[in-house]
Every structure is written in C-alpha cells, then in structure tokens.
Image (spheres, helix red, strand yellow):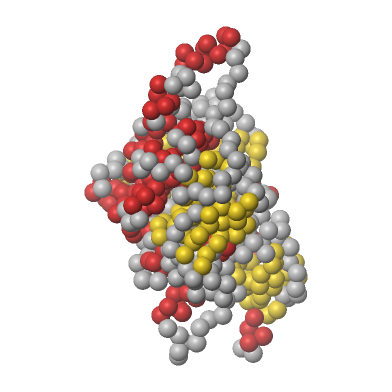
Amino acid sequence: MLLVPCPNCGPRDAGDFRHSGESISRPDPSSATPAQWREYLFLRNNAADWRVETWYCRACRTWFSTERHTMTNRFRTPPVDVLEQRGES
Amino acid sequence: MKMNKRGKGRYSAWGLVRKGLRGQAWPRVWEQHELESSYDVVIIGGGGHGLACAYYLATVHGITNVAVLEKGYLGGGGSGRNTAIVRSNYLTPEGVRFYERSMELYRSMAGDLNMNVMFSQRGHLTLAHSDASMRTMHWRAEVNKLMGVDSSVIDAAEVRRLVPMLDIERDKPHPIEGALYHPPGGIMRHDAVVWGYARGAGAAGVHLHQQTEVTDIVVTGGEGPDGKGPGGKVTGVRTNRGDISAPIVVNCTAGWASLVSGLAGLRLPITTTPLQAAVTEPTKVFLPAVIVSGSLHCYISQTDRGELVFGAAVDPVHTYDLRGSLEFTEGLAGHILELMPGVSKMRLMRQWAGLCDMTADYSPVMGFTPIEGHLVDVGWGTYGFKATPSAGEAMAEAVATGRTPDLIAAFDLARFSEDRLVGEKGAASVGH
C-alpha cells in the first residue's frame, strides 16, 4: 500500500489521488518555441531517485507537490499546496 | 541457425529420450567469455529484444563482434515478467504491420531457433462492454482486415459459444456486448523465446555478459557541458567489469531505458510504471482462448500446466518499485469474477510486477537518435513481448545498414518533435 501525504487529509491510500508525475515548469506561453512546448509535453527525466512531483487529492480537491524516491516510494518533504504556493488560491 | 540444425547441440525428442535414459547432463547452452576491450556493437539489455537484435545481427547480417550486456541475468526483466500474449490485431496500420511481422517470425520460431517455444494460437478475444467499445472493435477489425489480419467482431452469444465460462448476463455494470475475435492470437513460453535467441546468438559468436552493468556511456562532441547529449558521437561504455570501446551502443532496457539513455545525455519521452500480474493454482484446462477486457483492465489466459495467468493495467503511479499491492489483487479479482464468476474458489499462487516504459502515444520508440551511434529500442510499455522478433530484426537491420527500415520508420524518436504521434488505442491497458 502506498500512503500519500495530503496537506489537508494527511496520509491516505494512493487510490484516493491522481498522480500527475514529475513536476515540470510550464514554458512561458508568450515566448515559448514549438520545440520547448514539445519538450514540456513529452520529455521526462524519469529518474530513479528523489524527485519533486505533483499529486491531486480527490477527497479535498487539492493539487500539491511533494518529494518521493521512485525506487523505494518513500516521501520526504512535507506536501505543499501548489496553488497556494503560486498565490492562485 | 545452421549449427544447431546439424551439430550435436541440436535439441530433439530423440535426444531427450536418450539423455533421459542414460542420465546424461545437458551441455552448457552458451559459452561465457572474458569482456573484450572493444566490440563492433554493444547491446545494453539481455532480454528478448537485446538478444533478438544480437541474433539477427549475427545470423542475417554477419556482424558477430557483438556484446550483449545484462545487469542481472538473461530474461530477468520484462521478458520473463510479461503475460506471454501474442497478437497483431492493433488499431494503427503501422502497428498492425509491425506486430504481424512478429507473428510471422513467431510462427516459424520453433524451427528457426530449434527451441520449443510452445506457441499456441488458441484465439484471442478482446471483450467490449459498451457501444463505444464495440465501435472501437469494429474500427480495429476493419483496419485488421484491410491489412490481411484475421480479425472480426462477434456478438455476446458467439463469445459464450467460444468460451462457455464467460458470464454474458446483461444485469451487471459491465455486460459483455461482444468482442473482437482474433483467431491467430495466443500465448507462448516467454522464457523459451529468450533462451532460444540467447542460444542462437551465442552459437553465432555473440558474447553474452551477465552481471555486467553499464555505468556510463562515453559520448564526445555533444551539446551538453560534459560533451554528451544530442550532436555527440558514442565511443564506448564503462561497466562494472571494465571499459569497452564501441562505435554503436543500442539501448534495449525497457523499463530502465530513461536511465540508460540518460547516461548518454539523451532525454526520452518515457515514464516508467509497474504492471502487476498474478497466477492461480493449476486446474484442468477449461479456458480455450485468451480473454482481454480493456474496460475492466484485465487479461486472462490458461497455461498448458493449467494455471490461470492474470495481467492488469499499469499501476497509477510512476515508480521503479516492483512490490505488489493488496489493492491490485482485490481489484483484479473483482474484475475477473465479474467476467467469470465460476472461478471464485480458485486460489492465487503468486503475484509479481514488471516495469513498463510508457510513451504518450502507446507506441514504441525505435531507431536512431540525435547522438551518433546511439540507437534505442524502447518505449515498449505493455506490448514488448509480442514485438520481440520483429523489433530485434528491424533493429539489427538499422544497425547493419545505417538506415531506418520502413517497418519501424513511424516509430522514430523524432516523431515527438515533429507531431507525428502514432496513437495506438489497440494497446493493452488502454481503456476504450
């Protein structure tokens, strides 16, 4: 069982979440080239290491980011509400 | 392979009887070699794909100064973990053509490799549970027919006639509306495919190195700060057993593909996700065909020993961790029982997971890369085993001729930067 830390609900089973993969920054739409968009869409580091990733909690409807090791599935840093961090909430 | 067809190493029923009666030991199948300091071609990954590539390089193209480097043991990755289903009823013409070539090679494999690969073309049913699903099945059937593949849509009554164990009652969440029926599809012994290619490649002079982990790929002249990356040229690899210089390095490492090409400074359009499978205790043979349900995310076949082999969809989390989970077992069991309530008393013996290197369009990534001398045969997701022979054959041709064969031209890495994705909705684990 994979317990995912939600900033609101605490640790819950992975089935309660949507995993959206490694966190990547979106290129600036006003200046991004097609090559940068395609890189953003398709290319991934897919690291076997600690990585920052984005999750969505279906229970409290929060997008958050946290750090997980992809070989052991351990979580490390406290989860951060992504929208709050961006000042959009 | 000529040597096995004549030489004393040839396998036969008579040899089995003779060795059994005399209590003779079987000779070692392939020789172990010292790691040379240089090879013409280095193939990373000793699974079916890497070994098939080596086999066709040596036997078809006469390139025998080849090393296959395997971190663990031959066939210990996806080649030994898949559910051994073979079919060619895909949706895209590119996919159908490619997997049909694989079927051709599989049909003659037992003779070609002198290895009993236990290919059983027992028929393959992809169940549809909704009108939308039936529409996709018709679409696939028409593409298949056009490409000369035996494939048709049948109704629920016909499904029941072919597989009496299936429950076709309508009063449930996912009633069986019909199915895509693909008579040539079936299962085979996946380990035997690996061993057959390893034996054939070894006999043709290829060096197979197990317990040999590639720790670095040496690239010069690339655009990265360390000289790696696109625009560079491969000159060799470093391993835990010593350095090798080689002008061509092929990545056949499936789930680990991003990490291996990452050593050369190349990012791939791949995420790695486990797929779990399980097997029950053996019973008498009652399941005459391979059953797949895209909507219920499961596939079922019965081995010649009588065990039911179950596969599921890929896990919902990217990870390299191969541990199983109770959620998977419960979910899978629920889906299987919805299709076949009659197996409710059967016990699961084992479950395991394999890594799937998924791409955005459910098609593989094969051929040349922006790094000279670095080729990839990756992105095999949930369809790598059935592609083993044709992938090996096409990659060997690409290595030997320096040109991309027509058969795999659509699956190149450049498609992701040129908007030419090959959306393969006929792949397993894709909901319809």
Vertical position of residue B7 compared to residue B291: above or below = above
Residue B262 visible in rendering: yes
Q: Quadrant of the C terminus of chain A?
A: bottom right
Give the image location of residue B213, x and y in percent: 62, 51
In this view, which residue lies farthest toward the top? B21
Give the left or right position of residue B8, taking residue B159 as reference.
right
In this view, which residue lies farthest toward the front? B37
Residue drawn at the location 44% of the way across and 75% of the way down:
A38
Give the left or right position of residue B376, taking residue B74 as reference.
left
Q: Nearer the viewer, residue B24 or A56?
A: B24
Vertical position of residue B422 compared to residue A80: above or below = above
Residue drawn at the location 55% of the way across and 62% of the way down:
B218
Residue drawn at the location 54% of the way across and 29% of the way down:
B29
Vertical position of residue B348 compared to residue A85: above or below = above
What is the count of numbered marks? 0
Give the image location of residue A18, x and y in percent: 60, 67
Give the left or right position of residue A53, taking residue B341 as reference.
right
In this view, which residue lies farthest toward the left? B146
Give the left or right position of residue B275, taking residue B49 as reference.
right
- Determine which quarter of the picture holds residue B64: top left
Q: Quadrant of the N terminus of chain A?
A: bottom right
Residue drawn at the location 52% of the way across and 12% of the way down:
B17
Give the image location of residue B115, x and y in percent: 46, 28
Give the image location of residue B264, x and y in percent: 54, 64
Q: Nearer the viewer, residue B229 or A16?
A: B229
Residue B178 visible in rendering: no
Q: Nearer the viewer, residue B106 or B147?
A: B106
Q: Nearer the viewer, residue B130 or B373?
A: B373
